Amino acid sequence: MGRPKKATPAVEKAPNHLLGSFDFLPEQNLSWEVFLEKLTSLAHTFGYSKIDTPVFEDARLFSFWSQDQDRLLGLQDAKGLAIAAKPTNIFSLVRTFLENHFSERERVSKWYYCTPVAFISGNQIRQTSEFGFHIFGSAAPIADAQMINLLIKLFSEIGLAGLSLEINNIGCIECQPGYQDQLKNYFKDRKYDLCENCLEHLENNRPLLILACTNLSCSTASTDAPVSLDFVCEACRRQFIGVLEGLDELSLTYNLNQKVIGKSWSRRTVFELRFRVALAEVTLGNGGHSDDLVQSLGGAPTASLGFSGTVNTILSALELAQVKFTNKNPVDVFLVPLGDLAAKKTLRLFTELWNHQIIASEFIGPGSIKTQLKLAESNKVSIALIIGQKEAREGTVILRDVRSGMQELFTVERIIEEVKKRLGK
Ligand SMILES: [Zn+2]
Ligand SMILES: [Zn+2]
């Protein structure tokens, strides 16, 4: 045998991940998996079905998506059609609702999802996973209350309790323009207190956006701004009161918050769920109605209500709450093979244990008997199965009680029964 050949590097150093994208390492994925498991189980309990939509869509679908400086991550396909990564899932939900004629299939469609989204913000491509719930076809205010009920249950099950629910009503297509006029008149007299962005909002007839500005001067200027509930129409008021009564019925507390204004396609009731520890706060996601969206994309008028959040906000909140999850598949026995032949024999033993619902540790990593036994002890595993060269040849296994250090020799045929007995399985 000659010297092993050295591979020629394709690049001098592998480039790091791009800013705006993320690696989720095993410990983060464990939290995310626990969250998704709870989400799936609660979604089914509350009557939601899973929906998946593609990462890319015809870019025309996103013409309502305008987030100030953010742009679509787009390209042209071979036929010259502009396609884009979905910046958020709601437009794809509406598209599939229309394309698959869900309004004819069922009275109410209740969906949940978890899907990648991407867009360009400044000079960075941002990519994340968005999760959410959506209901098409139910205008009943109890739908809002019940969705909030589900969300609060979901977050409290992963250790995010004591959330603050910030809720507002921003009016509908009929009454919102009147409210925006009131705001415009109000902010006109306070022009000099507004930041550059807010001045632009004022000029572009979008004074509602000023209410959400976090700039201190804009916030102060908004203090006495007209309250939406004084200007929304009777239907919007009734809908909002219905939601609040539903929340009262569920004993869920809320804060009426004028600064919560939803997205540009939001209508009527909008809300946010926030998690706070001392001065730090994470908004877990936002929800509300988007009742004109189906019609805006060519469908019949359809009530539309949803909530969405991202993996990043959930992980930040769990970090803030110092919630850590441990792997819930505890190992029953530790396998300690010594040498190549023993390692080979362990393959079969692992499978036989598995067939009897006994979970054995992974055994393909290197390590001396001492380090492996230490590992077993630190993992609180009471049984180690040791196979040395001699045992491998003779078809036997040494069973070691990790705590006492007592060892006994068994044949491979008998070892399963003995382990089962000791584990009480
Ligand atoms: Zn209205
Ligand atoms: Zn501002």
Image: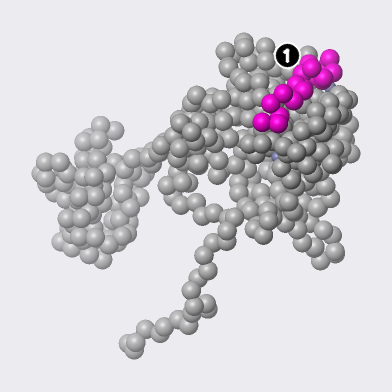
Q: Element type at marker 1?
A: helix
- The structure residue drawn at horizontal position 52% and vertical position 77%, both measured from the top left corner, is 11
Say which quarter of the image contains residue 188.
top right
Q: Is 260 left, or right, of 379 in this rendering?
A: right
| Percent x, y of residue 314 | 53, 39
Q: Is residue 91 magenta?
A: no
- Amino acid, disc 1: Ile
Say which quarter of the image contains residue 120.
bottom right
Front residue of 327 and 290: 290
Residue 365 appearing in the image: yes
- The structure residue drawn at horizontal position 31% and vertical position 49%, both measured from the top left corner, is 361
| Percent x, y of residue 34 | 48, 37
| Percent x, y of residue 215 | 65, 39
Q: Which residues are magenta?
A: 220-237
Front residue of 309 and 36: 309
The residue indicated by pointer 1 is: 241
Q: Is mark 1 within 8 Å of ligand 1?
A: no
| Percent x, y of residue 72 | 74, 54
Q: Is 121 left, or right, of 329 in this rendering?
A: right
